[in-house]
Amino acid sequence: MIKLKKINESILADVNELKLMNRFLMKYLQVQSLRLQEIEITKIITELMDNYRSIFSDRFTFTCNFSTSLPSLLADEEQLKEALAIIIDNAIDAAPEGGTVSITTAFHEMLTHKKKKNIISIEIEDNGCGISKDNLDKIFDPHYTNKKEGTGIGLAIAKRIVESHEGWIEVESKEKVGTKFALYLPVKNLP
């Protein structure tokens, strides 16, 4: 009887894990139209960071360095929040207890390495375990994960959201030092 109960619990755990993976996969595959509105990215980041501080302030340090000259963005606020939250969650998972997650914003009239004008950058950096060079090219692939209980869909969703705003993500990482995700979003003419 005890053996049957353990088998049943194991099956239920597997079913719940499959449900979670299915939910993330459906979210990844679903094409969502953007609900564009004028947003202040620093306001969104401040709200997110306040939430993270209220939950994790005893275990992590969160810092923000905002440019004072950021223009408004024409973007989907909820989707951008989701992309930022996914990357911040990954930073928290990678950072050691007592570690730091930092967010820096800037406005670039010209990004010479991409030949792009009027870009807002959002850098999310941690002092965690870093990502090996071998794995760096795989991190945005659906189902790739190094987490024991991860689905591997999160970063793929974040990338898709940023790209749907005609932006892009760049990643720098050094093992045992940390990782920096840089999100670049174009400033478009507001209505």
Image (cartoon, rainbow, N blue to C red):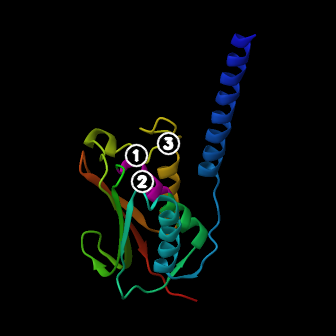
Which of the two labelled residues, at mark 3 and mark 1, occupies the earlier sequence position? Answer: 1
Magenta stretch: includes residue 173: no
Question: Which of these two is toward me, 2 or 4?
Answer: 2
Q: Secondary structure at mark 2?
A: helix
Q: Which residue position is annotated with label 3?
A: 152
User: Image height check: is 4 above or below 126?
Assistant: above
Of the two numbered discs 2 and 3 in the rendering, the one whose residue sits closer to the viewer: 2
Mark 3 → mark 1, Cα distance in angstroms: 8 Å
Residues shaded magenta: 86-95
Q: Earlier in the sequence, mark 2 or mark 1?
A: 2
Residue 92's mark? 2
Q: Position of residue 74 (x, y in %)?
A: 53, 80
Asked which secondary structure carries label 1, the reply is loop
In the rendered view of the protein, which quadrant contains the C terminus? Answer: bottom right
Residue 139's tag is 1
In front here: 48 or 29?
Answer: 48
Task: Give the amino acid at mark 2.
Answer: Ile
Return the residue found at the far right.
1
Q: Secondary structure at mark 3?
A: loop
Which residue is at a point 37% across and 77% down the rendered structure image?
119
Which residue is rendered at x = 47% and y = 58% of the image? Answer: 56
Q: Quadrant of residue 65?
A: bottom left
Q: Is residue 135 left or right of residue 175?
A: right
- Estimate how packed mark 3 is, as few (under 14), some (14 to 19) or many (20 or more) residues with alpha carbons within 10 Å: many
Q: From this viewpoint, is residue 35 visible?
A: yes
Q: Position of residue 126 (x, y in %)?
A: 33, 57
Asked whether disc 2 touches disc 3, contact meaning CB atoms under 8 Å apart, the reply is no
Residue 159 appears in the rendering: no
The alpha-carbon separation of the residues under discs 2 and 3 comes to: 16 Å
Tell me if label 2 and label 1 are in contact, CB under 8 Å: no
User: Above or below — where is 133 with respect to 71?
Assistant: above
